[in-house]
Image (cartoon, coloured by chain):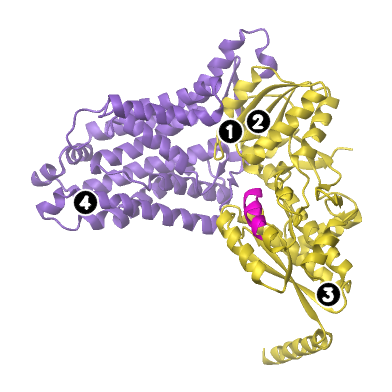
Chain colours: A yellow, B purple
Amino acid sequence: MTIAKTILGALAGVAVAASAVPALAQKTIALGYQAPLTGEMSQYGEVFRNSATMAVEQFNKSGKLPGATVVLKFEDSKNDAKEGVNIAKKFVDDQEIVGVLGDFSSTVSMAAAQVYAQAGVPQLSQTASHPDYVKISEWQFRNITTQAYEGPFVAKWALGEGKKKIAVIAIQNDWGQSVVSNFKDAVEKNGGQITAVEFYNPGNRDFRTILTKIARERPDAIYLGMFDEDGATLMQQRRQLNVQIPTYATSSLYSPKLVALAGPSADGLKLSTTFAVDNPEPVVKAYVDEYKARYKADPTMFAAQAYDATNIMLAAIAKVGPNVDRKSLRDALAQTAGFPGVTGETTFDPQTREPSKQLARMEIKGGQFTLVK
Amino acid sequence: MGAHFRGFSMFDAFFVQQLVNGFSVGLVYALIAIGFTLIFGVLNVVNFAHGEVYMVGAYAGVVLITAFAPPLIAVVLFVMAVGAVAGFGLERLAFKPFRRFQDEASLKSKAMREATLLSSLAVSIVVREIVEKLFGGAMRPVPFEAQLTEPIQVGDLSFSTGQFVIFGAAVAMFAGLQFLLYRTRIGLSIRAVANNPLGAKYVGINTDRTIIATFVVGSVMGAVAGILVALYYGSVFPHMGFAPGVKAFVAMVMGGLSSIPGAVICAIFLGLSEAVATEFLAQGWSELIAYGFLLLTLIFFPTGLFGGARDRV
């Protein structure tokens, strides 16, 4: 024991000494990351932290930014807007921080955004998809495509498969409403028809009544705007009710948990997504392999979003160099074009700061998400 | 459904399906309301932890199924045992300490009785948080082989195995409870304590033991309801007891607070009206129906639809 400890200690000492030599000249650049790390949404904050930590470690090792080390500072927003604002104030006062990642939901991200807009700190959210988020100020960026992009994509896919009459089921919140309005407009513009729009309250566990109601109109397809737990419950009850209407969904249902909860009931569900674990592209494969090795789990779409968001931020820092500040980082972020991430190539519109990226089509077959070519 | 309905009168088949949907939701509320109402009847206070007993029953059953995959009857027996322990422990922790003074003033004190509202609420929060720490806040699937979600097609209507099991369980619980209350000695003492706790004490009934027995019986029913509903919905989560618990509470109040048949009838009525309301309104509004009925009942029938005129209520 003692010998082993001595050797370990010696090795550690050498390692510290080795890294300490260049570290003497190293400058520290900090990025703030606010996300729900406890509470009901902690599952998302946790994968953000995993991916961001991994991205920063890889970046520091890569030598892309000589003379400086990037560190992450995490704060737990508990998915609460008030907490989000407090964290934003704390980050703004921290002079080491040049940019901020997060928050998770549009609501919290937008509350914090007011603080960052005033103080002039670039904020990049991996998931805030509310249309108004990037309109707050020139300091807000996002890395997720919005429903304005996804709705028409799925609408054209369904219409292309001959589904002319479509019923929509969505969660009753800001996001659900943007799902419905974008999808509805696209379907109607392209010659389709919406037979019913059904909103349900968050927390609802019984979709049988909604499914029975919309089945009466005999739509060609159903479109779902919801998250994995609701989606799994709905798909199970759809099978129980023997409703065989083909079903499409937003990318929010792209989660291993959907299949874990719904099992065979989820088969046949079609959805769009920007990230697929089994994507053979080298950049995706490298990310998935390392994530699995580190965290013993498949990365979700949310993990991939955070990985890309962090890397976009790091690429902008590398572009400016070790003397990066909040303003120069913002300008570099705004110039992001064709960034090769794991969720596709991302380009920020220099004016609106809206991202554009490629969407993939997926179908669940035999309990597996499979890419539709 | 879908193709099966073609050629039929649309309104009939879909509407009847909607009634089936509503009836099964109502039965879920009724399963919870039975145990809830039993405990209320005896103590005259709401046991806020009943939803957590339901949740604990579901988790205990799922843990057993995941580990050993035993037959359903073994799962139910195990969950009954867990429910009994939970009921005993809950009574010991949250209710018994408020009965430690045996003088007449304390026994009659409303404050002592109503303090258990908060103590049971406290126990419910602690239990829910512990389960969340142990198992995580997210939904967990029930192993698929054990789920009661197989579709059963009867003509144009779609049922599932869980609906029949829950119906059977509700009938069995209801009948079993009526037998217990009206044909056994412990049932007699439960009714006596419910009627007049002080009087029961004076005639030599061991009220303490009767109250414990009530908690055990009520919690066994709550726990069994939990596992059956979990198998029917295919998942468990720490907050699962809250929403149906609130509806069971509404059913209990509408039914007259201490009438078990009244609570069951009102629970089924609530489920049916929610399903039928979804036909005409968005699902989000169906909640309004349940609470609307509650308000109407309280305004026009202050003692509930099936409640006798009791001065304690």
As drawn, the label of residue A323 is 3
Chain of the residue under the numbered disc 4 shown in the image = B
Neighbourhood count class around disc 2 (C-alpha, 10 Å): few under 14, some 14–19, many 20 upward: many
How far apart marks 2 and 3 lie (CA) works out to 50 Å
State the separation of the CA atoms marked 1 and 4.
40 Å
Q: CA distance from mark 1 to mark 2?
A: 8 Å
Q: Nearer the viewer, residue A52 or B243?
A: A52
Residues shaded magenta: A105-115
Asked if the residue at tag 2 contacts the one at tag 4, i.e. Cβ–Cβ closer than 8 Å, the answer is no
Query: Which image quadrant for residue B30?
Result: top left
- Residue A200's disc number: 1
Q: Which residue is label 2 attached to?
A: A169
Mark 2 residue element: strand
Was residue B106 drawn as part of the magenta stretch in this picture? no
Point out residue B2 in the picture as x, y percentages from the top left corner: 68, 18
Residue type at the position of mark 2: Ile
